[in-house]
Amino acid sequence: MIVKEFKEEKFNLVKPLYNYLLENYLLENPDLQILELGVGFYFEMALKLKKNNYNITVMDFNQKAVDNANYLGLDAFKDDLFNPNHGLYGEYDLIYSVRPPRDLQNDIYNIAKLNNCELVIQPLSNETPLESLKAINYNGKILCKL
């Protein structure tokens, strides 16, 4: 699967998260190093951040997703969230993840905590947030943060 372009309809699914990151982190500090964990083949959020000159890197376990991200001009690397290479995460100030499976959320939390960086997760709409994260209602969308 090769994703070749930005799709506005896909971006609308993450627009609340994007706006939340802008309002709460990026407008005040546009030089933050941002990392999207578990990007898969949904690059709209990262592409929008890159288009607006933010420092974005994406990570996924699937090498084809990483190759696709690189093809689109995104910085990307492969890692396994269940057994992460912690040396890869030290340079990031802000980590986010879009609809990660619940069984990965604790691993994402641990990476952010170990690297002392901000974390925001947009869970699936029917999921209960991890107890270790603070649930917030942002314009009708539930987001979770460290």
Image: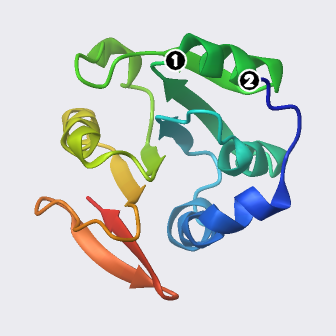
Q: Secondary structure at mark 2?
A: loop
Q: Quadrant of the C terminus?
A: bottom left
10 Å crowding of disc 1: few (<14), some (14-19), many (20+): some
Say which residue label 2 marks. Answer: 1
Dot label at residue 145: none
Spot the residue most to the right.
5
**Residue 104 to residue 142: above or below:** above
Residue drawn at x 43%, y 44% is: 95
**Residue 104 to residue 98: above or below:** above
Across and down, in percent, residue 131 comes to 11, 63
The quadrant where residue 126 appears: bottom left
**In this picture, residue 26 sits left or right of residue 8:** left
The quadrant where residue 46 appears: top right
Q: Quadrant of the N terminus?
A: top right
Front one among 50 and 121? 121
**In this picture, residue 102 sits left or right of residue 88:** left
**Residue 130 to residue 137: above or below:** above
Front one among 2 and 47? 2
Dot label at residue 62: 1
Q: Amino acid at mark 2?
A: Met
The quadrant where residue 20 appears: bottom right
